[in-house]
Image: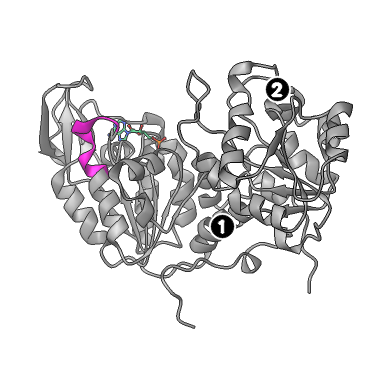
Amino acid sequence: MIKKANNPVPIKDILNKLTIEELDIKGKRVFVRADFNVPIDNNLSITDDRRIRSTLPTIDYLIDEGAKVILASHLGRPKGKIDPRFTLAPVAKRLQRLIGKEVLFAQDCIGAQLEGIVSRMKNGDVLLLENLRFNPGEEKNDEEFAKALARLADFYVNDAFGAAHRAHASIVGIPKFLPSAVGFLMRKEIEYLKGTVQNPVRPFVAILGGAKVSGKIGVLENLVDKVDKVIVGGGIAYTFIKAMGYEVGDSLVEPEMLDFADMLRKKLIEHNVKFYLPVDSVIAQSMEPGSETKIVTTQEIPKGWRALDIGPASAKLFSEAIQDAKTIIWNGPMGVFEMDAFSRGTFAIARTISDAYALTIIGGGDTDYAAHRAGVSDAISFISTGGGASLQLLEGKELPGIAALTDRKEE
Ligand code: AMP
């Protein structure tokens, strides 16, 4: 079979869990755990609603199939107390506009009054519960709280990929009491992130950057025997470079990761993985806007200077290495892209990735924002909605929120 570059692996081939389409939901109450943890400014205005939009396929499907749709999410860190700054009321309003249909908003997420509201819902009605984290039971994974949530519904659907790595009541607690399935967004995340790593079209290139080696090392370990090329840029590159014996001035280095980074580099090379590090860098003495910058080779970073972006030669080298890729996974910016002076490397790589004839996947968080700022988001095959959760999947770990769902019976 010839695999097309832009098709992920179907979920049935990689996960033995119920999916939303396998539930008989007409006229039934369906509890959807969504990730509506969107940025909201001081005037309670939503500044980026992509997380809400990405759950629309699940919500629309449930409405069309005549279910009673009960939506729940966390927002921010209210630490188990009611805090009006973290109300989901603005999300209810935005959702109403997006689906063109009334969205009821409940002041609480459990309780007799709420159960009354749910009992009066008609097929196709949509109800959003108040922030789950207003209740201390959510983050503690309290069993009584999970039971109270489960009492509201007949089925549970998890579409909150961004929260699937957390063992909270609404993620791992409710599925103990209800038949539980994967939602459409969750399915897409698993198909792209897990499916692609298990079964990539080659050459398969992983591009890693960002600030914390310790956050990315698990991904590299998991990819050792799966990828063809690894490109490391951003702050994490300088721990690898220092471990090779070079001086890196005041660049970011994680001393406790030096040995491990070196071991991993050697292991990748032993596995015949082509391993790329920056050959030049944009350096500065401080991150102050307007401070003097220079471009130097990796071997010549002076004391008192720090590398804050890959240089033009590295951008060219990395772009050449990416040219023939058929699958690309990118997590972590190539420099401090939030500042113009150190953004060119990240934007150059973002453009190269978006131009490649390949299945291209971005692993959430900062990298998503970088692609957005580079203006290439629409040309990427898939941008994950989860930062921590996408890293855990790329590390080959099981996510608690997926493991908790109901197993599919063998056909
Ligand atoms: P992470 O969460 O580990 O992906 O890190 C993302 C952050 O890494 C971004 O905010 C970047 O500003 C930062 N970053 C990227 N390259 C460097 C660098 N060379 N030095 C310091 N910080 C960096």
Q: Is residue 151 visible?
A: no
Q: Can residue 108 be seen in this view?
A: yes
Question: Magenta segment: does it hold 340?
Answer: yes
- The magenta region covers 338-346
Q: Mark 2 points at which residue?
A: 134
Residue 381 lies, with reference to residue 312, above or below; the image says: below
Q: Give me the C-alpha separation between circle 2 and circle 1.
A: 29 Å
For ligand 1, which image quadrant applies? top left
Secondary element at tag 1: helix
Quarter of the picture holding the C terminus: bottom right
Overall secondary structure of the magenta stretch? helix
Mark nearer the N terminus (2 vs 1): 2
Closer to the camera in the image, 291 or 232: 291
Rendered residue at 53%/40% (across/down)? 388
Q: Residue furthest bottom?
A: 1
Q: Mark 1 points at which residue?
A: 188
**Can you give x and y, in whole percent of width and height, for residue 252 in the image?**
30, 30
Please name the amino acid that badge 1 sits on.
Lys
